[in-house]
Image (tube, helix red, strand yellow):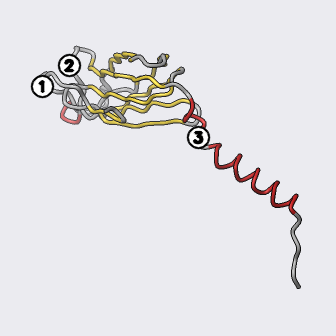
Amino acid sequence: MATRHSGTHLSVGFMLLSILAGAGDHYATLPYGALWVTVTASRGMPVSNARVTTSTVGWERQLRTDAVGKVQLCLVPAESIAVRVTANGYLPATSTVVVAPDSTALLSLTLAIDTTVPAQHRHVASVVELGPGSAAGCP
């Protein structure tokens, strides 16, 4: 048995598909900025290989700090960004930073030592080198 579809049903279907297809592009039209995060231990030494999670509604990025405890994120939505840092041997740290359009927000977080974890399991850089850090989405 053949089923007939009216033009109205097709129009509604195409409209619904257009709306759903555009839902993932929420941030495609928003302005962007950059975020540079520096992670250190309580004595000021950089924490390498720390996991830095940045997020806001509908957007999340995860990176690891480099040997000098830094990460750089470009194409970050220009709004309030939640930042959470975790590393072996340290207690987690969280913060919120506002990224402005076409600018770079700087955030420094200090991790407290988790005394229940042996020192050999902590990722602290022994030599501080100058460098740009790990970058995500940066030119």
At mark 2, the secondary structure is loop
Q: Disc 2, disc 3: CB below 8 Å?
A: no
The answer to whether 102 appears left or right of 124 in the picture is right
> Going 15% across and 21% down the picture, which residue do you hit?
130
Name the side, left or right, on which 39 lies relative to 83.
left
Residue 45 image label: 2
What is the three-letter code of the residue carrying label 3? Answer: Asp
- For the point 40% across and 37% down, the residue is 62
| Mark earlier in primary sequence (1, 2) | 2
Evaluate if marks 1 and 3 touch, with contact meaning CB atoms under 8 Å apart: no
The amino acid sitting under disc 2 is: Met
Number of numbered labels in the structure image = 3
As measured in the structure, the alpha-carbon distance from the residue carrying label 2 to the one carrying label 3 is 40 Å
Inter-mark Cα distance, 1 to 3: 43 Å
Q: Which callout, 2 or 3, points at the residue further toward the start of the chain? A: 3
Q: Which residue is mark 3?
A: 25
Residue located beneath label 1 in the image? 126
Helix or strand or loop: what does disc 1 sit on? loop
Q: Quadrant of the N terminus?
A: bottom right
Extreme residue in the bottom direction: 1
Q: Secondary structure at mark 3?
A: loop
In front: mark 1 or mark 3?
3
Residue 42 placed where, x, y %?
A: 27, 16
Q: Amino acid at mark 1?
A: Ser
